[in-house]
Amino acid sequence: MAYITVDVDVDLDEFDDADILKECKTRGLIALPNAPADTTNADRVIERAYLACRFLPGMPQELKDLFWQVHGRAMA
């Protein structure tokens, strides 16, 4: 069976944020705020959650993976 491939250049600036977020939700992806105005608040919330979870006994691996992906820090 022969396959045909097509390369497409897409400029994401042509889509508004609502469309991109809708597509992310459709794909089961989670979008975290990272606009310059939101970065400090988001980082603060993530740091507080990380610190609180460090002492949870038997923390699920999924939470450990989440902190690695979002915060770049491994949970022991």
Image (cartoon, rainbow, N blue to C red):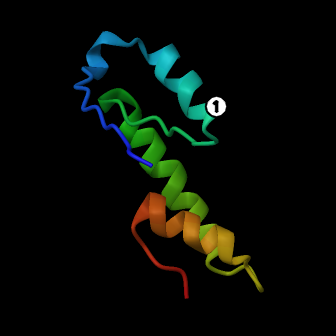
Residue most extreme to the front: 1
On the image, the x and y values in percent for residue 25 come to 62, 32
Q: Nearer the viewer, residue 6 or 39?
A: 6
Kindly identify the residue that appears in the image at 27 percent across and 23 percent down.
10
Q: Answer above or below: position of 28 versus 71.
A: above
Task: State the SS at label 1.
Answer: helix
On the image, the x and y values in percent for residue 18 come to 51, 15
The answer to whether residue 33 is left or right of residue 58 is: left
Crowd rating for badge 1 (residues with CA inside 10 Å; few <14, some 14–19, many 20+): few
Q: Image quadrant of residue 62?
A: bottom right
On the image, the x and y values in percent for residue 30 come to 57, 42
Q: Image quadrant of residue 37?
A: top left
On the image, the x and y values in percent for residue 73 come to 43, 73
**Picture quarter with the C terminus:** bottom right
Kindly identify the residue that appears in the image at 38 percent across and 45 percent down.
2
Residue most extreme to the right: 58
Residue type pointed to by label 1: Thr
Q: Which residue was labeled with disc 1? A: 26
Kindly identify the residue that appears in the image at 60 percent across and 74 percent down.
64
